[in-house]
């Protein structure tokens, strides 16, 4: 699977789909290679189990981890995805 690439400093919409269960809280965090949280945002419900958050990405190029965290019926679910932040290249 390809690692998603984003431009440094941009704000992007990230989403979560919950099938059947309503989450108490859902958040998304961007974590650096040194395991420092550089951005964390609570997701907003847009209805029918769909959640979204507008996340401002780091301004520094590199690999990061996107961590989605959801609490459903007192159980915590985490999803980790590697992302790459790139600088805009001008010719």
Image: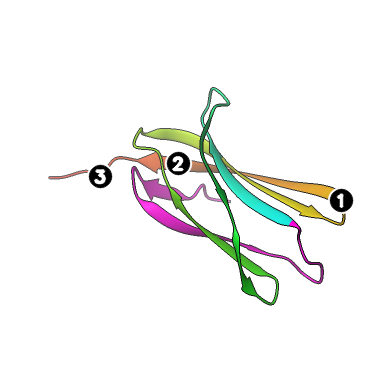
- Label 3 secondary element: loop
* Discs 2/1, front: 1
User: Spatial distance from mark 2 to mark 3, Cα to Cα?
Assistant: 13 Å
Please check the rendered image and state whether residue 66 is part of the magenta-colored stretch, yes or no: no
Name the quadrant containing residue 24. Answer: bottom right
Q: Where is residue 59 in the image (x, y as percent from the top left)?
A: 34, 37
Res 88 label: 3
Q: Where is residue 79 in the image (x, y as percent from the top left)?
A: 69, 47
The residue positioned 48% from the left and 50% from the top of the image is: 4
- Label 2 secondary element: strand
The residue positioned 33% from the left and 44% from the top of the image is: 9
The residue positioned 80% from the left and 47% from the top of the image is: 76
Relative depth, front residue between 58 and 1: 58
**Quadrant for the C terminus in the image:** top left
Res 74 label: 1
Q: Where is residue 77 in the image (x, y as percent from the top left)?
A: 77, 49
User: Spatial distance from mark 2 to mark 1, Cα to Cα?
Assistant: 32 Å
Magenta part of the protein: which range?
A: 1-24
Disc tally is: 3
Neighbourhood count class around disc 3 (C-alpha, 10 Å): few under 14, some 14–19, many 20 upward:
few
On the image, numbered disc 2 is attached to which residue?
Answer: 84
* Discs 3/1, front: 1
């Amino acid at each position: 699977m390809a690692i998603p690439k984003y431009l440094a400093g941009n704000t992007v919409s990230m989403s979560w789909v919950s099938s059947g269960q309503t989450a108490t809280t859902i958040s998304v965090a961007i974590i650096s290679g040194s395991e420092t949280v550089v951005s964390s945002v609570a997701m907003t419900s847009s209805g029918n189990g769909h959640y979204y958050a507008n996340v401002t990405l780091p301004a520094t190029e590199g690999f990061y981890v996107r961590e989605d965290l959801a609490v459903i019926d007192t159980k915590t679910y985490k999803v980790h995805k590697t992302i790459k932040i790139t600088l805009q290249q001008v010719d």
